[in-house]
Image (tube, grey):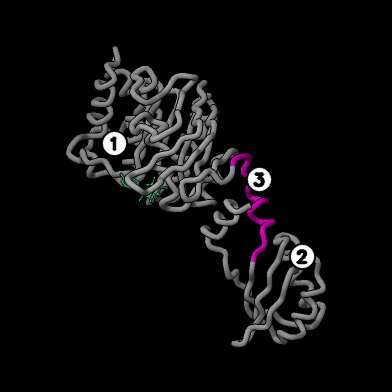
């Protein structure tokens, strides 16, 4: 069981600050690292894996720094986002090469064991460039796990993977987490993180924006003020009805028609809206969030 601890970690490239003063602890089980593109997730993972030195601050694994510490490398496996460039190798050869690099006493045995774990025994005799995206991911995971690390870091492991393979990968990560492995995976997709991780860390623009149980963070996100565009059979009458509701903060009639409504409690508003319009003899034509981009959700978390 391992704890990965980041203490006031920053990393800059020239004058670009990729990671800004991040403090967090990643413990056993599955944790999701959520953030929009360019948030600094890859840079954070590279520092956690000991592949990149922090510009300031420290990353430690069970109290020992990971940077330039070969003992720590034996405890960490990294599954990078980039594609494997060894398409001419078979899956087995690639995993075996990693086992050899770790100088495992029984590299052949470890290779077979881990191919079994990721369910890749049968295709492992084929060249990697004949594999589907999901199979390539599983081989990368096998290579990262072959030395039996206590920490597994995965950068956007579900990108481009079809839904069936995604479920398969999620089951695998869940199993590793249940067995006590410290599993951290990054994603920019909320639903993906929600399905797999109970604990999440959110990063935005290099900063640590939120940390905790997924439900609590989801609530923070749904309780934030949200703006909707609504069109109905009688917008003026609907405006009068809506402004009386406690969850509604403001209502504007738009010059081009329809309403712009700001809501403070998304759950209550969503549950109320349909029965409310019906009971006033009104018909809803369109309801769409005006600022529901993931970036706006993240920006809200940062500004809190
Ligand atoms: N080697 C580098 N040189 C210069 N800038 C870099 C370098 N690596 C990362 N950056 C910058 O640091 C910021 C964070 O990048 P990073 O790749 O860590 O984010 P990310 O959350 O992983 O994004 P994505 O999901 O798009 O990969 C970006 O602005 C990126 O352009």
Labels 1, 2: front one: 2
Front-lying residue, 155 or 114: 155
Residue 108 in percent (x, y) is at: 27, 19
C-alpha distance separating marks 3 and 2: 21 Å
Residue 105 shows up from this direction: yes
* Circle 1 residue: 123
Residue range (magenta): 211-226
Marks 1 and 2 close (CB-CB < 8 Å): no
Q: Earlier in the sequence, mark 1 or mark 2?
A: 1
Marks 3 and 1 close (CB-CB < 8 Å): no
Q: Is mark 3 within 8 Å of ligand 1?
A: no
Residue 76 in percent (x, y) is at: 40, 26
The disc placed on residue 215 is 3
Reply above or below: 103 against 39: above
* Circle 2 residue: 247
Front-lying residue, 293 or 277: 293
Front-lying residue, 171 or 61: 61
C-alpha distance separating marks 1 and 2: 55 Å
Residue 119 shows up from this direction: no
C-alpha distance separating marks 3 and 1: 39 Å
- Dot 3: what SS? helix
Reply above or below: 258 against 89: below
Count residues near mark 3 (Cα–Cα under 10 Å), then give few for <14, some for 14-19, many for 20+: few
Labels 3, 1: front one: 3
- Dot 2: what SS? loop
Q: Residue at x 38, y 35 (%)?
A: 55
Q: Earlier in the sequence, mark 3 or mark 2?
A: 3
Whether residue 59 appears in magenta in the rendering, the answer is: no
Count residues near mark 1 (Cα–Cα under 10 Å), then give few for <14, some for 14-19, many for 20+: some
How many numbered circles does the render carry? 3
The majority secondary structure of the magenta stretch comes to helix
Q: Residue at x 75, y 80 (%)?
A: 239
């Amino acid at each position: 069981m391992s704890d990965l601890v980041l203490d006031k970690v920053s990393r800059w490239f020239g004058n670009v600050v990729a990671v800004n003063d991040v403090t967090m602890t990643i413990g056993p089980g599955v944790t999701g690292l959520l953030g929009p593109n360019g948030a600094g997730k890859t840079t954070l993972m590279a520092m956690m894996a000991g592949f990149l030195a922090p510009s300031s601050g420290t990353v430690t694994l069970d109290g020992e720094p990971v940077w330039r510490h070969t003992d720590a490398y034996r405890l960490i496996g990294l599954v990078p986002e980039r594609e494997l460039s060894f398409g001419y190798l078979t899956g087995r050869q690639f995993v075996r090469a990693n086992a050899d690099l770790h100088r495992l006493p029984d590299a052949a045995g470890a290779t077979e064991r881990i191919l079994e774990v990721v369910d890749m025994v049968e295709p492992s005799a084929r060249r990697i460039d004949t594999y589907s995206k999901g199979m390539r991911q599983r081989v990368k995971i096998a290579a990262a796990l072959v030395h039996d690390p206590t920490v597994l870091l995965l950068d956007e492991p579900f990108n481009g993977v079809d839904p069936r393979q995604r479920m398969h990968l999620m089951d695998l990560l869940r199993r590793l987490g249940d067995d006590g492995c410290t599993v951290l995976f990054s994603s920019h997709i909320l639903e993906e993180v929600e399905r797999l991780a109970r604990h999440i860390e959110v990063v935005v623009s290099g900063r640590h924006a939120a940390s905790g149980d997924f439900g609590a963070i989801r609530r923070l996100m749904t309780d934030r003020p949200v703006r909707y565009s609504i069109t109905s059979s009688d917008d003026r009458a609907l405006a009068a009805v809506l402004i009386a509701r406690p969850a509604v903060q403001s209502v504007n009639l738009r010059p081009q028609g329809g309403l712009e409504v700001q809501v403070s409690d998304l759950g209550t508003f969503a549950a109320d809206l349909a029965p409310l319009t019906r009971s006033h003899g009104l018909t809803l034509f369109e309801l769409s969030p005006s600022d529901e981009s993931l970036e706006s959700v993240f920006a809200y978390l940062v500004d809190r």
